[in-house]
Image (cartoon, rainbow, N blue to C red):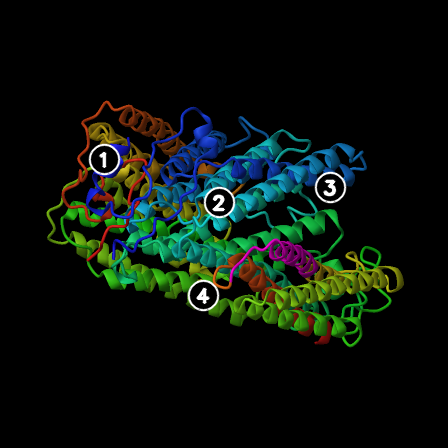
Amino acid sequence: MMSEHQEYYVPDQSKWPIIATFGLGTTLFGAATIMVDGGQGASTSGGWMIFAAGLSLMAYMIFGWFGSVVRESRAGLYSPQMDRSFRWGMSWFIFSEIMFFAAFFGALFYARVFAIPWLGGEGDRGSSNMLWEGFQATWPLINTPDPSLYPAPKGVIGPWGLPLINTILLVSSSFTITVAHHALRAGNRKKLKLWLSATIVLALVFVGLQAEEYMHAYQDLNLTLQSGIYGSTFFMLTGFHGAHVILGTVMLIVMLMRVRKGHFTADSHFGFEATAWYWHFVDAVWLVLFVFVYVI
Amino acid sequence: MSTVADAHTSEHSLGQKHDHHGPAKGWTRWLFTTNHKDIGTMYLIFSFAMFLLGGTMAMVIRAELFQPGLQIVQPEFFNQMTTMHGLIMVFGAVMPAFVGLANWMLPLMVGAPDMALPRMNNWSFWLLPCAFLILVSTLFMDGGGPNFGWTFYAPLSTTYGPPSTTYFIFALHIAGASSIMGAINVIATILNMRAPGMTLMKMPLFVWTWLITAFLLLAVMPVLAGVLTMMLMDINFGTSFFDASGGGDPVLFQHIFWFFGHPEVYIMILPAFGAISHIIPAFSRKPLFGYASMVYAVGAIALLSFLVWAHHMFTVGIPIAGQLFFMYATLLIAVPTGVKVFNWVATMFRGSLTFEAPMLFAIAFVILFTVGGFSGLMLAIAPADFQYHDTYFVVAHFHYVLVPGAIFGIFASAYFWLPKWTGYMYDETLAKTHFWLSFVGMNLAFFPMHFLGLAGMPRRIPDYALQFADFNRVSSIGAFLFGATQLLFLFIVVKCARGSGEPAAAKPWDGAEGLEWTVPSPAPYHTFSTPPEVH
């Protein structure tokens, strides 16, 4: 038993976490400064400078930190036990991401099931009638209780146009990444590159269509973040999902670059697998989102 | 150092690839470290610093409330003090203290060489000083710091909050990221790094309670991030999550916040449950009564914690069916909690008890936490809560579960494991003094608040009617006593760390059990490079 034990890799001192701390702290302090100064009508250039400095630190850190992990992995320093630590780490990270989305889905369900019917006078909540006489509870909520604060959009985005195409794209991309994964396990690098590239193309087209949908919403429909609770939930859910798609696409591109450099073997490719997990998670969130934000 | 480190593993040194070295030289050791003991120490020091800072704010509050009328501070500043006191104690003192204990003790308890992801561990720690630097700096910004209570209810914090609220949001985002990464590390360590033979139901209870706490953290810290993000958008980008004129609802804020907030209060107590379940058996010289039921009870408490959040919101106006559901679900928590209290008492029953400082704190924990639990039952009864809500009765309740609960649990743990950390025994006489002064001070400070609350004194108000004067004076005196006593704790720990006590044996407590007592005291810089066998 003991002789089989491979030592667990405990890295030596590392400068990356403290750089990451300065990076994240500076980035968010800068972001807050931009928002607060901008909100007071002051110049935001100072905030932008802090923000940019933080972002560059973060970029430097990400290259450096992931670079060391990749080097250590390729040097064979990681035991199967280390591999399991990474797997647990990634799984629980994805779980925490699910809970983050759950908060926003919770807000959507609460608004639809409770808040808006109550505002419309359901149950004994008719008191809102004194504030906003004649407010009609509808979903999608086009006319907000106070349209002077939250102007009404001309319409909302139906599910069977771009959103349906996007659904097909994302589901297909979950399929293509799985084909790529099987190819990697079978040692077929050519097939791996092909299907991984196909996944990236699907992801980029999704992001492009999503951007087009946003422009359509803002320019043609006047559906914005300020359109009341419908716009708030619509843009925050699709927006955070889109941000995750972009992050996942960057991860996929990095994986393609690593594959082209000859990284990963048929048995050892957790970086690729974690990216695939993340991609499936992004896909699953979209399916829930498609049903509850667009269809129902 | 390496000879000491290898001494205990000499029988297991097969497969050892390279020598372990001691800590790096110079101050950069602390910036770059990946060592769980270094990081644990930093967490504990940071947490104590925050405890003193948050405590100082509590002293300002109690000084203002020493007599009726506005004496020392303006109401605006008083509001910032109550808010920052709560935020700092919750996110800066109690949570990091338990993460510090986890860092130090989990690898030693499960026989692992370190935490599963050591570099991320360093990042989790250093994000905290960063977060609190930003949070405390809001006090010096235009319009002052957060003044809406630690629960930052919308629209107080959105429409009516000071401009610095955006900084507050990002500070809590950073602290939350730290907690999430810390929890991932704890879970990966427990699930993946246990010594061969240590099955789940052989794990020490501190390990069990932390496993469940880490799960709670991963489930609710992202929800906190979600509600903070909605606030950020409402304040800066015109969304209307919490604004009814856009179809949103301020009550939505409370639902999401308390979906985080209620599990959060268990996050602050479950690790203490675990530590107490080590300390009481050690000083009773008996195995813990009902190990399996303790594990199941913690699991049950954790599951129930997701189903009770709206008991914080009875008076906000929720449907009667909701009130009934949340009332009964909350009362149900008394069952597993009762199991735990019964088991602790049964462990002591007919044991060979001695009353060193950790045991004193542990026994006070059991009794006084139960007091806090009972006032919790009173508050859980929806119709009664209409009377108690937002009075000092609530303040008394949660200080009884957090001070003699979480804080005494941390003190008990600190005294219990200080010999292992420093290699020296602490000064027992001073430690007992620390206990008795804390015990008396804390009861004087918080017990009268029950009466004040039942008589109708509202919380978070800097002035009060004359009939509340006597109890407030007693309460303030108790708070000053409790606060000043904590400087004695600092003195005791520094004295112990500087090696003025007797050298500690590997197992300084004769009734203690667990792998952490099989390594020398102080624990070498690297332990269990090769896992021990557990039978």
Could you tell me how far apart the alpha carbons at marks 1 and 2 are, in whole angstroms? 27 Å
Residue for badge 1? B521
* Magenta stretch: helix, strand or loop mostly: helix
Q: Earlier in the sequence, mark 1 or mark 2?
A: 2
| Chain hosting mark 4 | B
Q: Nearer the viewer, mark 2 or mark 4?
A: 2
Pick the front one: B282 or B112: B112
Residue for badge 3? A35
Residue type of the residue flagged with mark 2: Met
Left-right relation of B105 to A77:
left
A261 in magenta? yes
Question: Secondary structure under badge 2?
Answer: helix
Question: Secondary structure under badge 4?
Answer: helix
Residue for badge 4? B327
Query: Is residue B441 visible to us here?
Result: yes
Please tell me whether residue B171 is drawn above or below residue B431 in the rendered image: below
Disc 3 to disc 2: CB gap under 8 Å: no
Is circle 1 on the same chain as circle 2?
A: yes
Q: Name the residue located 53 percent from the left edge and 31 percent from the top edge.
A: B69
Residue type of the residue flagged with mark 3: Met
A121 in magenta? no
